[in-house]
Image (cartoon, helix red, strand yellow):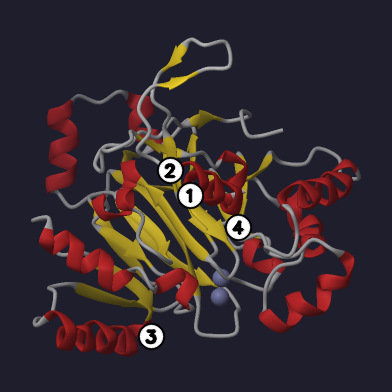
Amino acid sequence: MANGEMKGAGAEGTGAGPVEGARGKPQPPREWPLLPGLAAIKTPYFHIVGYSVAGEESVIQIPELNLNFDIGKCPRPALTADFCLLTHGHIDHSAGIPYYLSQRFFQGMKPGTILCPAKIARPLSDIIHSWAGLEGKVTEHTIVPMQVGDEYELRKGLIARAFATRHTVSSIGFSIIDRREKLRADLLEQNLPGHMLRKMKEAGEKITYTLDVPLVAYTGDTSMGETLLQPGVMDAKILLTECTFFEPDHTKRARQGQHLHVRELLEVLPQLKNELILLTHVSRRTHLKAAKRVFAEGLAKLTNPPKVEFFMDYQQRLMVKPGRAAPFTVEEKALGEGAE
Ligand SMILES: [Zn+2]
Ligand SMILES: [Zn+2]
C-alpha cells in the first residue's frame, strides 16, 4: 500500500550507501519507491500505464496511441503523450492539465491537445488562462470540445469517438478506433491488377469500404451499466471501465455519486465482447483484495464470462537510485501476472 511505502522510505531514508546484511555481507545500495506506483500492463496491442483510485487520481496512458485518458495528476510518463482525453472535470481526473501543458512547454515539447465534454471546454480554458496570472503567460494548448458521437482524428486512421456516459457532472467516454480503407470484397476476389483498380477509381467508382476496429474504450466515471453495451464500447478489444463500489451496502453510495456498483457490471458482463476488461476507479473504502473476492464470487455464477482484471493489480514501484533524481524504470507485467 502507498502509505506503507511512504513510511518505509521516510523511516529509513534514501541516501544510504552499502549496508551490512544480516550475515555480515555488504549489500548493494537499496532502491526506494517513488510514489505512487503506476500500474503497467502489456497487452497484445499496446501498453497501458497509469493509476486509478476513486476520488484520488485517475490517469491512464497508452504510449503507442500517444494519449492519456484523464489526467488527475501528471505522473512523469504522462507528459510524453500529445493528447489528453478528458472524460469529465472532477479534480481527480483533470487537475493534472495545467501542469501537463506547462511542463511540456518547459521541456520543449509541442503544445498538448485536450479533448473534453463540450460543456466544460469554456471553464477548462478559463482555468488555463487563470494560471497565466501565476506563471506570467498562457501556455499554448488546444481544446477540442466533444459531443456524444463526435469524432476526432488523433493521427491518420486513428479516431477518438465520444460515447455517452452518465455522471454527476457533464461527462463522456472515449473509444479509440483504428479506421482503414479496405478493398471491396468482390474486387478482392477478382484479383484485379492495380491499373484496372486505378481506372475504376478515376471513373468515380467506390472501390474500397471503411473498416472500423475499436481498439480500446474508456468510460471515465459513469453510473449506467448500459454505457458498456454501446457499439465501440462492448466490442472494443480492450475495455477500461470504472467499477467503484463492491460491497452490498454501498449501492446507495454508487447511486448518489453516479458510479457503477459491481452488481450492475456483473449484469451486463455476459453481453460484452471485449478480449480484455480492466476495472479501474475502485473505491478506497474497499481493499482491492476484498473487491476481487466479491467480484470472483459474482463471476463464478456466469457462464463463459469475458476476461476481467483489476487495473491496479498491476501496480508496481517505480524505482529510483539513491541520490539520483532522474531515470526510473517501469517493468510492465504481461497479462495474468497481476498480484495474487
Ligand atoms: Zn472519479
Ligand atoms: Zn467523477
Q: Is residue 167 left or right of residue 317?
A: right
The image position of residue 208, as x and y in percent, is: 30, 44
Look at 17% across and 45% down and name the residue there. 201
Q: Which residue is mark 4?
A: 241
**Mark closest to the chain's N terminus, 2 or 4:** 2
Q: What mark, if any, has residue 114 been given in the picture?
A: none
Give how far apart the Cα atoms at labels 4 and 1 are. Answer: 35 Å
Q: Disc 1, disc 2: CB below 8 Å?
A: yes
Q: Which residue is mark 2?
A: 13
Q: Which residue is mark 3?
A: 120
- Is the residue marked by circle 3 packed among few (<14), some (14-19), or many (20+) residues within 10 Å? some
Q: Which residue is mark 1?
A: 10
- Three-letter amino acid code at the position of disc 3: Ile
Q: Is residue 268 left or right of residue 218?
A: right
Look at 23% across and 52% down and name the residue there. 155
Look at 32% across and 83% down and name the residue there. 124
Look at the image and tell me whether residue 274 can be seen: no
- Three-letter amino acid code at the position of disc 1: Gly
Look at 50% across and 78% down and name the residue there. 171
Look at the image and tell me whether residue 314 can be seen: yes
- Numbered disc 3: secondary structure: helix
Q: Disc 3, disc 2: CB below 8 Å?
A: no
Give how far apart the Cα atoms at labels 1 and 2 are. Answer: 5 Å
- Three-letter amino acid code at the position of disc 4: Thr
- Numbered disc 2: secondary structure: loop
Q: Disc 1, disc 3: CB below 8 Å?
A: no
Give how far apart the Cα atoms at labels 3 and 2 are. Answer: 43 Å
Q: Disc 4, disc 1: CB below 8 Å?
A: no
- Numbered disc 4: secondary structure: strand
Rendered position, 247 above or below 165? above
The number of discs equals: 4
